[in-house]
Amino acid sequence: MKLLIAIINNPEKVVDILDEFYKVEINGATVMDSTGMAHIMANYVPFFSRFAEVGDEPTANKSIFVVIHSEDQLLKAIQSIEKIIGDLNEPDTGVVMTVPIDFQKGLFKKEGNEFRL
């Protein structure tokens, strides 16, 4: 298992990404507001103020967290994201990464004698 972390620069596109996830049977995700370092530093260090865009909301990004169970599911997740926001290698789209999950508790729930997601 892996944890996919997707930081999406345009928060308005997150619902569309989640809809694409649902279409490819990725049925669970957590979404959180997130702010980039330049936006935070712009308030404290004058040098960084030129990197923050004027008029931007302080919370300019959304971060999506998804547990990925297979390489096929990972590919579907990335394709879903890029279908909505475009090529992640282009500027101002987002960032996607995975980290291995070496421990979890609570992800699988017991029903009777069987576990389910």
Image: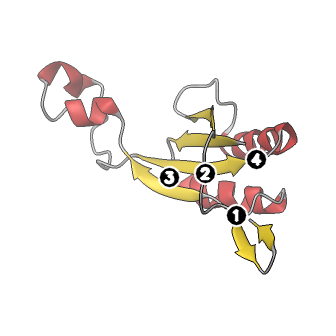
Identify the residue position indicated by label 2 in the image.
Answer: 104
Secondary structure of the residue carrying tag 1 is: loop
| First of labels 1, 3 by sequence position | 3
Q: Residue at x 62, y 58 (%)?
A: 29
- Marks 2 and 1, Cα distance to the nearest angstrom? 9 Å
Give the amino acid type for the residue marked by disc 2 in the picture. Answer: Gln
Identify the residue shown where x is 84% and y is 56%. Answer: 24
The residue depicted at 55 percent of the width and 58 percent of the height is: 30
Q: CA distance from mark 1 to mark 3?
A: 29 Å
Image quadrant in which the C terminus is located: bottom right
Nearer to us: label 4 or label 1: 1
- Does residue 94 appear to the left or right of 60 in the view shown? right
What residue did someone put label 4 on? 80
**Cα separation between marks 4 and 3:** 15 Å
Q: Position of residue 85 (x, y in %)?
A: 65, 42
Asked whether the beta carbons under mark 2 and mark 1 sit within 8 Å of each other, the answer is yes
From where the camera sits, is residue 52 visible? no
Graded by Cα atoms within 10 Å as few (under 14), some (14 to 19) or many (20 or more), the crowding at tag 1 reads few
Q: Give residue 72's position: percent from left, percent from top.
A: 87, 41
Query: Mark 3 belongs to which amino acid?
Result: Pro
Of residues 73 and 34, the one nearer the viewer is 73
The residue indicated by pointer 3 is 11
Q: Is residue 92 visible?
A: yes
